[in-house]
Structure formats: C-alpha cells, structure tokens
Amino acid sequence: MIIIKSKQEIGWMREAGKVTGYILNELKNIIKPGISTWDIDHFVEKTVKEHGMIASEKGYCGYPASVCTSVNEEVVHGIPSKKRILREGDIVSVDLVVEHHGYMADAARTYPVGKISEEAQHLIDTAEKAFFDGIAFAKVGYRLSDISNAIQQTVEGEGFNVIRDFVGHGIGSEMHEDPQIPNYGKPGKGPRLQEGMTLAIEPMICQGSYEVDVLLDDWTAVTVDGGLAAHYENTVVITDGEPELLTL
Ligand code: MF3
Ligand code: CO
C-alpha cells in the first residue's frame, strides 16, 4: 500500500531533506585524495546531530554506520572505514538518510576524488541525468514505470547499464515503503502517481554487466566484473504540478 502523506508529514520530510541536501553539497569540499571513508561518516554523523536530527541508517537492519560510502566498483552499502583511504582517480558514492520527527529523507551522490577519467565522469553525469529524465514523469497522470523506463532509456543510451538488484522506494516514517521503483522496465505499468506520494528515486548504474555480489561484510554490493558504479538519488514529492525535490 502506498501511503499518501499529509502537509505536516511532508513538512517534516522537507526539513530532513534540507539537512540531507546541505550535507551532500558540503561533501563536495570535503572529499579529496587522502581522506578516509570514515571521515565522511564522521562529518555526516556530527552535522546531522548539530541539526537535532537522526542519521537513520545507523542500526537499520544492523547497519553499523551513519552513511553508506561505496568506492569505485562498489555499488551501494559500502561501510565507512578508517582504513579505506580515497585516492586520486577514485569515485565514491555517498548515500544518506536523515530523520526528523520520525519522517525521513533519502539521497545519494557520486563524487570524484581529485582528477578522474572522462569515462568515470560520464558515468557520474549519466546517473544524474537519468534521475532528471525519470522525474519528468513524476507527475499525476503518469504511472510508476514511466519513471523507470525513462531512467533505463537514458542510461542505456549513454552505453551504460542499470543495476537490477536494488531499486528506489516509497519513503516516509519508514525508510523503505511501497512502491518499489526499479530503474528499468516497460512504460505504462504499475500504480498511477498521486499527489502526496513521497518517493526515493535512485538510479544505480554501472559501466559493464549489472550483475552484483555482496562482500563478506554482508553489506557492500560490488559489480561482479569490477566495472565502476554510480548512484544519484533524491526524495521526491508528487504534487499537483511539478515534482518537489526535498534533498537538493
Ligand atoms: N539509503 C539506502 C537507500 O537508498 C538504504 C541504505 S541501507 C542501510 O535505500 F542499511 F544502510 F541503511
Ligand atoms: Co533509497
């Protein structure tokens, strides 16, 4: 069942989303060669606390950190570590959930570490472009898979692939609510979009095969072929007009 949110619930998510977006924007200045993924976790945990909010990933299904940091061939759910030092040419995906009054906002970006290859930058740019091409359909009158299809078209049109094992999702007082939102599929399927739906739309894409494995830490998902992966996510409200993005 897809939960339609009230004005007040959306208001709390908007507050959570502002802090999420602020942190993701600040990270552009923090992520550089020589820092560790733990440094990212530390900044996130501290900044969320300073705003009187909660970083909800910590403890979710036993997840041990405040943020996910996934480097290069890691797709999602990489665990921050003092030993994982970022090096020039790496890319790192940061995925964050902030909670305020029990309501959540979820967003992710992939960052370059120093100077990166043209191909890596193209992958990062394509994840973002796919998100925006997808949300062109995040309006009353379309169906859910119109978003999925638009994302897939963009990603494959740029010569990359869409990860199948992870999907976007509804979000609110739970991190993962109905509906699931695959980043691929035929258009015109699934529920009709309605005002007050709150959706985490999140293209996860890769250079090569979309097959993924989970490492022995039980969390980190990597591409099996070792190709790079990128992630771009925002929490989106369906309105009576253009979608509202809570986490920019
Ligand atoms: N934020 C992720 C998502 O986009 C979920 C992270 S799982 C967690 O849905 F365990 F790290 F919280
Ligand atoms: Co999400």
Image (cartoon, grey):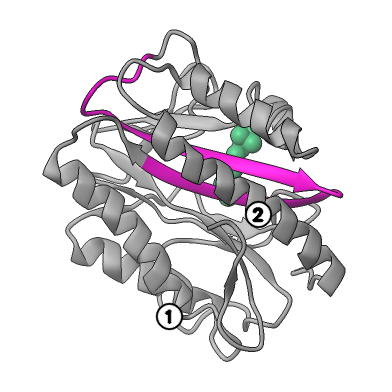
Determine which quarter of the picture holds residue 73: top left
Going 50% across and 19% down the picture, which residue do you hit? 39
Q: Is residue 60 left or right of residue 95?
A: right
Q: Is residue 240 left or right of residue 186?
A: right
**Residue where numbered disc 2 is placed:** 17
Q: Quadrant of ligand 1?
A: top right
Q: Please tell me whether residue 93 belongs to the stretch shown in magenta.
A: yes
Magenta stretch: helix, strand or loop mostly: strand
Segment tinted magenta in the rendering: 85-110
Give how far across and how far down residue 31 sits, in percent: 39, 29
Residue furthest toward the left? 118
Going 43% across and 80% down the picture, which residue do you hit? 187
Check if mark 1's residue and mark 2's residue have beta carbons within 8 Å. no
The tag on residue 31 is none
Going 13% across and 44% down the picture, which residue do you hit? 118
Q: Is residue 39 left or right of residue 31?
A: right
**Residue where numbered disc 1 is placed:** 187
Secondary structure at badge 2 equals: helix
Going 73% across and 27% down the picture, which residue do you hit? 59
Question: Which amino acid, by three-letter code, is at mark 2?
Answer: Gly
Estimate how packed mark 2 is, as few (under 14), some (14 to 19) or many (20 or more) residues with alpha carbons within 10 Å. many
> Looking at mark 2, is its residue's CB closer than 8 Å to ligand 2?
no
Determine which quarter of the picture holds residue 186: bottom left
Secondary structure at badge 1 equals: loop
The residues tagged by marks 1 and 2 sit, at their Cα atoms, a distance apart of 29 Å
| Location of residue 153 with respect to 224 vertically, above or below | below
